[in-house]
Image (tube, rainbow, N blue to C red):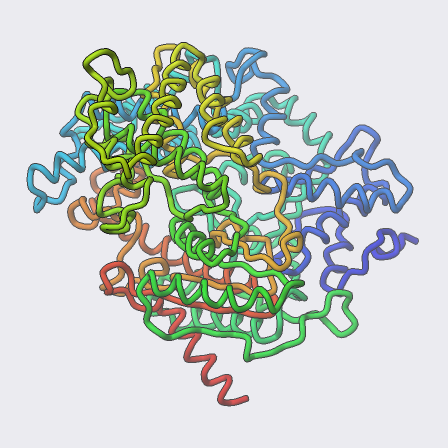
């Protein structure tokens, strides 16, 4: 008689987990609420199937998950379960992300999909770089092509500014999604071009996407490379083309266990459907209520929902969660019920669905924390954005010293909100753990380096030299422990950012200027920089300065900085990575800053190898985009190896809600829960993807993708109607943001604080779901 799973594996499953572990074969779908132990259960199931002898010696269980950190997590857990049985770990299973799985499939026979055996996969940074170049070329060749979409109320100067400063980034994002969407539909640029040419009336946005897509693919072909989206498309193509390959992989992977299935895309569904076969063994685990990655992608919770509705699929639930107190569970469940029954937009009432979260049963090894309804605070007070930051920072400052053995996180909807809070905390001598687009250390180090490089690229600019001085002096002051916690932006002549010498930067302390302020101001007024840095007979700006004797410190400061800049100029003949490392020795002493500079130097070296024609201005921009957080830079974080909140007890983590998915903390703050970050379809709501400089509130990304669909419709112009895609995108975004709020709430174990702000213009209101939660909670407390 086959033993029960809990006897076979060192794991004490709950009754609902036991139902999942009894799986033997066929199709099974599992709805798992936040904190239900789905990773543990799925890992245990994999180990159980191996221990029960369900595989031949040359077979594996295939586990497909969403992110790299989950790959290591699954592999380690399964290995521990397998070792309990006295079996060898790391045998009998393979854990992959979708991209990793696609790579395995394509590597089987690259020639099958038209690739050389030594084909290359370009990384995210290089893919973005190639796309940026293609976008800039298109905009230079078509400077007025998007004028028809600009707000007609803009005057000529404003239009010119939008073309120069706003359109490149917008088009870059737009076409990036366009290419990704086209590849997901397996549409190449040549097929798209032919289709667009066959239409009786042009689809201008789709044509723009096609032109840039063509240049992007040409650049990949020149390198003999593919990007990550190609891998998935080509993997499906290989499976569809070679029946023997498909048969062999079906034999190799007789069981497929899919994690985070609510984020499955169309291509992922097709690939796994083929691998499983019509009578295969496929287990899909996920939570449609936590689908928060679908905007402008083909990911959708509907794939999992439809799978669960199939008559040939065993439907299971993991509804028990020991993560949160009863009160937090009650609040999350009410958000589900309110959304389904009372959301003001009927079409958004399907955003959340059952099951409810249930506490763990009596005697469970992970009991729910002791309940205290008084530790839930849904703040109704109206605050400006700055006031909200101060309220949260003050609260964190009070809470941390009293809870040294507990964890805390502030979760924000957007990175920039997190940066603002980070700065406020540092002014209180609180150093947060950052899980944002880039860490503060990365932004500061890359910003400082970019400012100095920016001057060296334009050595006659007094304003850039003044900025470089301030960077150096602030770095020196930081080394002495007198740091001011501010963002070192690029100067006004640079790739973007505020001039730190100007009055608007708020950095000038008034008449009693510091030595640094006086020095920076003098340098900025230098009429000929060369006469300061490289003086000669009759032309020595420093010697000619009419300064009183009491300004001896100022003269010494100017002389010392001149020697430093002369040394910097001496690096001009070195390779760019050596220039960066040399500058770092003068700017930084902390191991973190020096290590970050080393990684930046590697990035610059690779950029130089890829672009032999690049000079210092282009290299400076490569660093500047990281300083401005316009490109993800892999710094020293746990993003790729898994983040453990319990390693940061007594500290506060600042994270976006998206990055917090799958994590939990004792105390959680949710910020900016207003009708801009969490809209509900009310007339006065605004939407992040609708740019202020476009007419009719158009969402140009949505419209472009809609034109791509229209191009392949049998009746394109009866189907495509301008503005319809914008309205649909609003609904998708509203639904996704409800789920994002649900994810945020369910990160909290014991305490939850939710705040909102009125926006920069003072017109924002609390998000309607927050108002509903506040009303419910007030009644709940009165009833208690």
Residue 320 appears at what percent x and percent y? 66, 66
**Residue sitting at the far front:** 549
Is residue 258 placed above or below 195 in the rendered structure?
below
In the figure, residue 388 lies in which quadrant? Answer: bottom left
- Image position of 396 (left or right of 73): left
Q: Residue at x 22, y 46 (%)?
A: 503
In the picture, which quadrant includes the C terminus? bottom right
Can residue 605 be seen by looking at this rendering? no
Can residue 236 be seen by looking at this rendering? yes
- Image position of 375 (left or right of 756): right
Q: How many marks?
A: 0
Q: Residue at x 32, y 29 (%)?
A: 558
Q: Could you say which is closer to the camera, residue 468 or residue 275? A: 468
Residue 398 appears at what percent x and percent y? 52, 68
Is residue 103 placed above or below 257 in the rendered structure?
above
Q: Residue at x 32, y 45 (%)?
A: 514
Q: Could you say which is closer to the camera, residue 590 or residue 51? A: 590
Residue 67 appears at what percent x and percent y? 58, 41
In the figure, residue 383 lies in which quadrant? Answer: bottom left
Q: Could you say which is closer to the camera, residue 470 or residue 516? A: 516
Residue 653 appears at what percent x and percent y? 54, 54
């Amino acid at each position: 008689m086959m033993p029960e799973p809990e006897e076979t594996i060192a794991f004490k499953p709950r009754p609902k987990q036991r139902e999942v572990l009894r799986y033997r074969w066929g199709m099974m779908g599992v709805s798992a609420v936040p904190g239900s132990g789905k990773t543990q259960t799925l890992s245990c199931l994999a180990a159980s199937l191996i221990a029960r002898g369900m595989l031949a010696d040359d077979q594996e269980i295939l586990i497909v998950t969403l992110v790299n950190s989950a790959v290591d997590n699954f592999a380690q857990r399964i290995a521990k379960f397998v070792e309990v049985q006295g079996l060898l770990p790391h045998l009998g299973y393979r854990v992959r992300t979708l991209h990793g799985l696609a790579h395995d499939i394509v590597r089987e026979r690259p020639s099958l999909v038209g690739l050389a055996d030594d084909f290359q996969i370009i990384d995210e940074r290089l893919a973005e770089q190639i796309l940026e170049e293609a976008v800039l070329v298109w905009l230079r060749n078509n400077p007025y092509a998007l004028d028809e979409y600009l707000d007609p109320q803009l005057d000529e100067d404003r239009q010119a500014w939008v073309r120069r400063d706003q359109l490149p980034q917008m088009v870059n994002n737009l076409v990036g999604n366009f290419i990704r969407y086209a590849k997901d539909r397996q549409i190449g640029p040549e097929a798209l071009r032919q289709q667009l040419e066959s239409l009786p009336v042009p689809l201008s946005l789709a044509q723009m996407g096609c032109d840039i897509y063509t240049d992007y693919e040409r650049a990949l072909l020149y390198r003999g490379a593919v990007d990550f989206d190609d891998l998935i498309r080509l993997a499906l193509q290989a499976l569809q083309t070679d029946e023997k390959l498909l048969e062999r992989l079906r034999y190799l992977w007789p069981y497929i266990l899919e994690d985070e299935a609510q984020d499955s895309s169309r291509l992922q569904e097709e690939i796994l459907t083929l691998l499983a076969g019509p009578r295969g063994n496929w287990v899909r685990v996920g939570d449609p209520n936590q689908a928060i990655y679908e905007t402008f992608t083909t990911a959708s919770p509907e794939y999992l929902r439809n799978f669960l509705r199939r008559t040939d699929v065993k439907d299971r639930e993991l509804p028990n969660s020991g993560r949160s107190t009863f009160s937090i569970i009650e609040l999350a469940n009410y958000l589900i019920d309110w959304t389904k029954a009372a959301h003001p937009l009927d079409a958004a009432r399907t955003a959340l669905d059952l099951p409810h979260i249930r506490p763990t049963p009596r005697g469970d090894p992970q009991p729910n924390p002791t309940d205290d309804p008084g530790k839930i605070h849904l703040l109704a007070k109206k605050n400006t954005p700055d006031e909200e930051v101060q309220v949260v920072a003050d609260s964190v400052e009070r809470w941390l010293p009293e809870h040294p053995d507990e964890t805390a996180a502030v979760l924000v909807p957007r990175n920039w909100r997190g940066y603002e809070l980070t700065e406020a905390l540092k002014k209180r001598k609180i150093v947060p753990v950052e899980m944002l687009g880039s860490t503060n250390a990365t932004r500061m180090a890359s910003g400082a380096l970019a400012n100095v490089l920016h001057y060296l690229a334009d050595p006659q600019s007094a304003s850039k030299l003044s900025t470089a001085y301030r960077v150096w002096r602030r770095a020196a002051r930081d080394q002495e422990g007198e740091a001011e916690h501010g963002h070192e932006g690029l100067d006004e002549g640079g790739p973007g950012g505020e001039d730190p010498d100007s009055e608007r930067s708020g950095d000038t302390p008034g008449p009693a200027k510091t030595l640094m302020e006086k020095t920076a101001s003098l340098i900025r007024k230098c009429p000929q920089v060369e006469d300061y840095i490289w003086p000669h007979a009759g032309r020595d700006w420093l010697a000619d300065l009419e300064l009183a004797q009491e300004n001896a410190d100022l003269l010494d400061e100017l002389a010392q900085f001149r020697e430093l800049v002369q040394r910097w100029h001496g690096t001009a003949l070195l390779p760019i990575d050596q220039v960066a490392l040399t500058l770092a020795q003068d700017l930084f002493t902390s191991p973190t800053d020096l290590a970050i500079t080393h990684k930046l130097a590697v990035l610059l070296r690779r950029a130089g190898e890829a672009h032999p024609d690049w000079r210092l201005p282009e290299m400076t921009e490569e660093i500047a985009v990281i300083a401005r957080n316009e490109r993800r830079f892999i710094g020293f974080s746990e993003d790729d190896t898994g983040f453990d909140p319990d390693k940061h007890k007594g500290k506060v983590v600042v994270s976006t809600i998206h990055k917090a998915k799958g994590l939990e903390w004792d105390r959680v703050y949710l910020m900016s829960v207003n009708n801009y970050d969490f809209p509900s379809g009310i007339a006065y709501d605004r939407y992040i993807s609708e740019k202020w400089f476009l007419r009719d509130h158009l969402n140009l990304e949505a419209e472009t993708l809609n034109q791509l669909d229209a191009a392949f419709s049998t009746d394109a112009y009866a189907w495509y109607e301008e503005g319809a895609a914008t309205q649909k995108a609003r609904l998708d975004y509203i639904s996704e943001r409800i789920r994002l709020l649900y994810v945020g709430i369910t990160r909290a174990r014991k305490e939850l604080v939710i705040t909102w702000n009125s926006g920069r213009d003072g017109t924002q209101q609390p998000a309607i779901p927050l108002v509903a939660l506040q009303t419910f909670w007030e009644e709940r407390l009165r009833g208690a």
